[in-house]
């Protein structure tokens, strides 16, 4: 009966585009045609830092604990709206759309590895406020699509600090990010997050896993801040 009710509600008030809220063509669509065309795909990027170009100081991930990073889209426009829908509007279907984009474009070398997917943990205060962990929801959706195990091996401590809008120096300040490993981590791991900004959180996660003997294959995200 609940399925019939859901269909009736969808017919009376069809779900809108997750990015712009406009009407979508079909019942199973999550993005409208305009937003789908406007997705900011990253066609070429440095395999180390995920950026399409480097500034004068060179690759910002040259000394990162992860050997490779990747994201299918730039963190702008429609991609930014999708991330915002997940993180700030609790629109969980956005995670499935993001995972679909990641799975469809994942490099063959990362698709072939047997590494488990390890989500970047949210700060406890943020998780309590939202009622869920965005990176974990995204990783779950991606694990289903890739038929890959998910390993919840990381926890985050310390005081919750706001990442959005923080300058690079603040994001990378010593002691800002506390990541610990719990239980038995997987032998090989791919770290998963929603947005790769400076890479500080991904680096902290990679260092924590490596300290316990895990080989970090890559750090992947849905979107890369340019």
Image (cartoon, grey):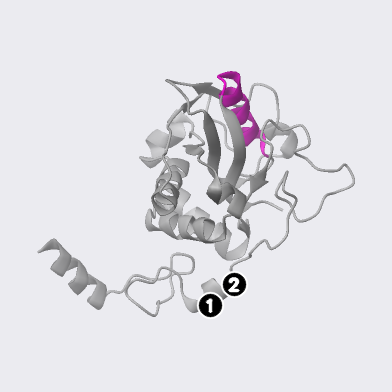
Q: CA separation, marks 1 and 2?
A: 6 Å
Secondary element at image label 2: loop
Q: Do the residues labelled 1 and 2 touch (CB within 8 Å)?
A: yes
User: In which image quadrant can residue 203 be found?
Assistant: top right
Q: Residue furthest right?
A: 56
Secondary element at image label 1: helix
Q: Which residue corresponds to mark 1?
A: 34
Whether residue 12 is situated above or below residue 68 in the rendered picture: below
Depth order, front residue of 171/96: 96
- Could you say which disc has been placed on residue 38 in the image? 2
Label 2 environment density (alpha carbons within 10 Å; few <14, some 14–19, many ≥20): few
Q: Where is residue 200 in the image (x, y as percent from the top left)?
A: 66, 34
- The residue under the point 18% across, 73% down is 8
Q: Where is residue 1 in the image (x, y as percent from the top left)?
A: 9, 64
- The residue under the point 60% across, 57% down is 72
Q: Where is residue 210 in the image (x, y as percent from the top left)?
A: 60, 24
User: In which image quadrant can residue 5 be found?
Assistant: bottom left
The stretch in magenta equals 199-213
């Amino acid at each position: 009966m609940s399925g019939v009710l859901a269909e009736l509600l969808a017919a009376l008030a069809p779900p809108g585009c997750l990015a712009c809220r406009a009407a979508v063509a079909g019942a199973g669509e999550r993005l409208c045609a305009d937003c789908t065309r406007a997705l900011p795909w990253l066609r070429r990027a440095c395999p180390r830092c995920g950026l399409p170009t480097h500034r004068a100081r060179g690759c910002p991930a040259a000394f990162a604990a992860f050997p490779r990073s990747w994201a299918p889209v730039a963190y702008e426009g429609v991609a930014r709206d999708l991330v915002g829908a997940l993180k700030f509007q609790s629109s969980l279907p956005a995670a499935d759309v993001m995972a679909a984009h990641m799975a469809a474009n994942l490099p063959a070398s990362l698709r072939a590895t047997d590494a488990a997917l390890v989500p970047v943990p949210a700060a406890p205060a943020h998780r309590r406020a939202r009622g869920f962990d965005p990176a974990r929801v995204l990783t779950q959706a991606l694990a289903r699509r890739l038929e890959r195990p998910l390993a919840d091996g990381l926890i985050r401590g310390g005081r919750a600090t706001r990442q959005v809008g923080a300058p690079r120096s603040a994001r990378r300040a010593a002691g800002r990010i506390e990541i610990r490993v719990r239980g038995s981590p997987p032998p090989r791991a791919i770290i998963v997050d929603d947005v790769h900004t400076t890479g500080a959180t991904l680096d902290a996660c990679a260092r924590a896993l490596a300290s316990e003997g895990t080989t970090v294959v890559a750090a992947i995200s849905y979107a890369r801040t340019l």
